[in-house]
Image (cartoon, grey):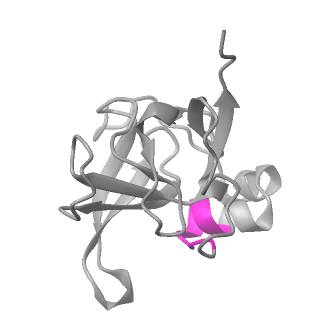
């Protein structure tokens, strides 16, 4: 169990992660890189479904919390549950931001921004790398 989130923690060696993930997935999820803006597969996706962690399959976000922020990355206003992600201070690149990590495998997902005035219920923008996610579409009946 993860002492911060209380969720099961996936532990793998760096070699195991390298074998499971593509080089670009590894760079983002394990080394906190950022994919180029407007190039991720889910930036403009409007499909209904669940967004899971590409590293471990944990449910992170649902399509009904995704919104158009026009920032170049998929944006969500709320994670699936309070224990789906971990937030931690990120002082890289000479600024203070809030990093968003998968609570299950601690993969880097992106960053959280608040108070930008998007008119979402939480006034938060979880700016997430597409490459850190996998969309499991839901059949619409």
Question: Residue reaching furthest bottom?
Answer: 94
Residue drawn at x 58%, y 36% as measured from the top left:
52
Magenta-colored span: 27-35
Establish if 52 lies above or below 100: above
Q: Is residue 8 above or below residue 79?
A: above
Asked whether residue 62 appears in the rendered view, the answer is no
Residue 33, quarter of picture: bottom right
Left or right: 34 as drawn, with respect to 116: right
In-image side of 71 versus 11 (left or right): left
**Residue toward you, 59 or 19:** 59
Residue under the point 47% across and 49% down: 106
Q: Quadrant of the C terminus?
A: top right
Q: Is residue 79 magenta?
A: no
Q: Which residue is at the far left?
A: 115
4 displayed left or right of 79: left
Location of residue 126 in the rendering, given as x and y in whole percent from the top left corner: 38, 54
Res 38 quadrant in image? bottom right
For residue 133, say whether it is visible: yes
Residue in front for this viewpoint, 77 or 7: 77
Residue 108 picture location, percent across and down: 50, 58
Q: Is residue 29 magenta?
A: yes
Q: Is residue 71 left or right of residue 42?
A: left
Nearest the eye: 133 or 119: 119
Q: Say which quarter of the image contains residue 35.
A: bottom right
Q: How many marks?
A: 0
- Quarter of the image with the N terminus is top left
Please name the residue shown 68% across and 62% down the image.
26
For the point 66% across and 57% down, the residue is 131
Instruction: Point out residue 27 in the picture as x, y percentages from the top left corner.
Output: 65, 69
């Amino acid at each position: 169990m993860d002492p911060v989130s209380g969720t099961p923690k996936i532990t793998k060696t760096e070699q195991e992660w390298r074998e499971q993930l593509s080089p670009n997935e590894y760079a983002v999820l394990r080394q906190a890189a950022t994919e180029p803006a407007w190039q991720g597969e889910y930036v403009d996706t409007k499909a209904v479904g669940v967004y899971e962690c590409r590293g471990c399959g944990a449910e992170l976000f649902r399509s009904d919390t995704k919104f158009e922020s026009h920032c170049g990355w998929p944006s969500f206003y709320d994670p699936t549950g309070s224990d789906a992600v971990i937030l931690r201070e990120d002082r890289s690149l000479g600024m203070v931001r809030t990093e968003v990590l998968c609570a299950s495998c601690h993969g880097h997902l992106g960053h959280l921004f608040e108070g930008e005035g998007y008119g979402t219920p939480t006034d938060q923008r979880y700016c997430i790398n597409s490459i850190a996610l996998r969309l499991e579409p839901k059949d619409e009946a």
